[in-house]
Image (spheres, rainbow, N blue to C red):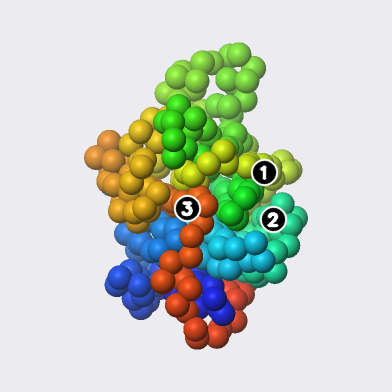
């Protein structure tokens, strides 16, 4: 965890140190062994877990609480290393760090969030592409790659950007039925459903359910990132997650029923509970959840930061010599 003026930011998975409430904080020293990481900025929070079936967590998250010209602003990025690609853990971590290095100063300056998101996903793409080099594993089929989803939450607008099948949801603070998925997966399953070949239920059970058609990396798809500007109808929560969660609970209303209203006042506790739910349901994949209550409200943890520091810079990815 680090301070930047009136901003508080952190990247996970992490290398060393502890921060607010003893939660591990980010290190730029490169990928390390990790099973479970939590970040609590008060204004928003996130949790990532290896799950039961994987040797390491190839998901990563980066979040920030800052003050923009319009008031408190939350920034969040979640990336999921693509299965079968080389060094997916490094890809996801490089991507979230690079994206946050663009989104945080843009939010502080009040720059257009859609334009900043486009610059952020490009920075993430370049950071992941730089990782391409000697393969770490002879079983890896592709260059390092990752999915991407980000959100910039201001007092009057939510801006979401994505590429791949990591998702963003709106969890309404009033009616559970008003919850909605803000993203559409870049996946073969989605294409089959859109073409009428499979139903949504059949797609989730098919081998194509998690074959992504959009991703970051040196061999990244030609698919352009997507953007959504959403004006919430009232209080609620913006949730970002990897498929390790939505694979077990894809419907927005079902997620809202499980998370709300606690997510509005206790985002860390609720993120933990959602990760625990996915673990209890099988934990077949890495699981990442970020919860950002709307409207964002500055907390003591964020507004009390007085130590001046530089914003996070785009990482210099480590290239293994083989």
Q: Horizontal and vertical percent for residue 113?
A: 69, 55
| Residue closest to the eye, 176 or 288 | 176
| Residue closest to the eye, 109 or 130 | 109
Q: Is residue 204 above or below residue 97?
A: above
Badge 1: residue crowd in 10 Å (few <14, some 14–19, many ≥20):
some
Q: CA distance from mark 3 to mark 2?
A: 16 Å
- Residue under the point 34% across and 76% down: 18
Q: Earlier in the sequence, mark 2 or mark 1?
A: 2
Q: Horizontal and vertical percent for residue 140?
A: 50, 50
Tag shown at residue 3:
none
Under tag 1, what secondary structure? strand
Q: CA distance from mark 3 to mark 1?
A: 16 Å
Q: Is residue 211 above or below residue 86?
A: above
Q: Is residue 46 above or below residue 258?
A: below
- Residue under the point 29% across and 47% down: 273
**Residue under label 3:** 292
- Residue under the point 31% across and 41% down: 278
Q: Horizontal and vertical percent for residue 267?
A: 37, 53
Under tag 2, what secondary structure? helix
**Residue under label 2:** 113
| Residue closest to the eye, 98 or 127 | 98
Tag shown at residue 229:
1
Q: Say whether residue 220 is visible.
A: yes
- Residue under the point 35% across and 33% down: 257
Q: Are marks 2 and 1 in contact (CB under 8 Å)?
A: yes
300 displayed left or right of 227:
left
Q: Residue most toward the left?
A: 280
């Amino acid at each position: 965890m680090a301070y930047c003026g009136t901003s508080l930011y952190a990247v996970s998975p992490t290398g060393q140190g502890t921060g607010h409430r003893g939660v591990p904080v980010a290190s730029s020293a490169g990928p390390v062994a990790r099973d479970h990481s939590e970040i609590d900025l008060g204004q928003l929070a996130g949790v990532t877990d290896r799950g039961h079936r994987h040797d390491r967590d190839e998901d990563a998250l980066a979040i920030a609480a800052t003050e923009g010209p319009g008031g408190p602003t939350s920034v969040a990025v979640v990336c999921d290393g693509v299965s079968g690609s080389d060094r997916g853990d490094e890809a996801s971590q490089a991507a979230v760090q690079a994206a946050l290095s663009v989104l945080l100063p843009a939010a502080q300056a009040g720059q257009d969030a859609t334009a900043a998101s486009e610059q952020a996903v490009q920075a993430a793409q370049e950071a992941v592409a730089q990782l391409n080099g000697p393969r770490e594993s002879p079983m890896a089929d592709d260059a390092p790659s990752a999915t991407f989803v980000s959100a910039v939450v201001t007092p009057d607008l939510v801006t979401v950007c994505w590429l791949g099948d990591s998702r963003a949801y709106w969890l309404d603070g009033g009616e559970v039925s008003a919850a909605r998925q803000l993203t559409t997966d870049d996946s073969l399953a989605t294409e089959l459903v859109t073409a009428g070949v499979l139903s949504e239920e059949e797609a989730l059970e098919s081998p194509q359910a998690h074959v992504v058609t959009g991703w970051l990396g040196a061999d990244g798809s030609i698919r352009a990132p997507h953007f959504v500007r959403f004006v919430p109808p009232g209080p609620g929560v913006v949730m970002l997650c990897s498929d390790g969660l939505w694979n077990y609970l894809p419907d927005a209303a079902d997620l809202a029923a499980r998370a709300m209203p606690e997510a509005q006042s206790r985002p860390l506790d609720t993120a933990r509970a959602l990760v625990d739910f996915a673990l209890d349901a099988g934990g077949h994949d890495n699981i990442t959840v970020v919860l950002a209550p709307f409207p964002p409200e500055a907390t003591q943890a964020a507004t009390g930061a007085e130590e001046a520091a530089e914003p996070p810079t785009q990482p210099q990815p480590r290239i293994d010599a083989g």
